[in-house]
Image: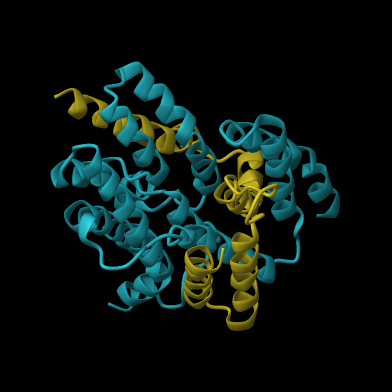
Chain colours: A yellow, B cyan
Amino acid sequence: MKSVILIAAMSVTTILLRGLPFIVFRSKTPKYIAYLGRMLPPAIIGMLVIYCLKDVTLTARPFGLPELIAGACVVLVQIWKRSSLVSILSGTVIYMVLVQAVF
Amino acid sequence: MRTVSQAFYKSVPVLAGYVVLGTGFGILMQNAGYGVLWTAAMSIFIFAGSMQYVGVGLLAGGASVITTVITTIMVNARHLFYSISMVDQYKNTGKYKPYLIFALTDETYSLLCGGDVPEGADPDLYRFLVSLFNQCYWVTGSILGSLLGAVLPFSTTGIEFSMTALFIAAFTEQWLTTKDHIPALTGLLSTLVCLVLFGRENFLIPAMLLITLVLTLLRSREEGAV
């Protein structure tokens, strides 16, 4: 029963966080918010990249090399093929090989 | 029908990542003593990846409601920013709007924040289906993890990189399609600075505030140009 309440608390809080800006800016979007709407997406994706890499340790083996190599692979394949599917798949496979068999 | 296949194609890059991360979540839940119904309920009603991972610990540790609410706000505060940047795009989406807002995860956001809709697609239905497909992958993955996590025949170590790869690919793609790289660089550098200053546990909220501050200060740059 306790778990049901906790799950409900997580659900409702998450919905409120996602919904709040839509309620606050319901009538008309202020220019400043519209500006943020254009500028935030690339910045937040940059932030998420760093967020995913936050636990990489650069000062001890393997010095972040698996992430660096696999990440570079994703960038290069994306530039080459322009397909997220191909770049994500190849980067992930390379990373799995690196952490399981090389480093 | 065309919209369905276009939305499916758009969502495919998330498929692998969500099934894998969802499976990881299902395995964690199973190990913590929570079966498939609990796992499915969380993936259906919360649908926030990192929060659900944190939530396993809260459930297993018997956290209080207050702790749970505060932790959820800390972990999910970034969604405020996603929503702020989607206010205009989701403005007139009618009956799809509640679900679109509910399902605005990191990954759905990274697919839809560009605002582009394929030719011939119904824009609202397209956004709805991309969101819905993503949640289907997430729910399916978590149920799979709950049911067969312990008997996987091969090592999945490192498969979590698919999510990192998803964001790197999205970052590269937006870099290739835009001329103005200032916002992207602002995001990278502000986050790095905050990671160094605040440490890996607490840097996300400061990073968002710094990004918003820098972009706000840069607004005069844009107005000067227009």
Q: Position of residue B191 (x, y in %)?
A: 68, 42
Q: Position of residue B26 (x, y in %)?
A: 26, 49
Q: Quadrant of residue B73?
A: top left
Give the residue at x 76% y 61%: B180
Decide which of B128, B57 is in the foreground and name it: B57
Residue at screen point 74% across, 53% down: B185
Q: Position of residue B176 (x, y in %)?
A: 68, 71
Does residue B134 appear in the picture of this structure? yes
Q: Farthest residue toward the right? A: B224
**In which quadrant of the rendered image does the N terminus of chain B lie?**
bottom left
**B155 to the left or right of B179:** left
Position in image of residue B152 (x %, y %): 25, 63
Q: Is residue B89 left or right of residue B192?
A: left
Image height of A99 relative to A86, above or below: above
Residue nearest the observer in this picture, B183 or A26: B183
* Residue A85 appears left or right of B156: right
Classify residue B58 by image quadrant: top left
Report the residue that reaches farthest toward the bottom.
A81
Residue B112 appears in the rendering: no
Query: In front here: B93 or B12?
Result: B12
Q: Is the C terminus of chain B in the top left, top right, bottom left or bottom right quadrant?
A: bottom right
In percent of the image, x 43 and y 68: which residue is there?
B13
- Report how many numbered discs are placed on residues in the image: 0
Decide which of B107, B19 is in the foreground and name it.
Answer: B19
Q: Residue at x 29, y 55 (%)?
A: B23
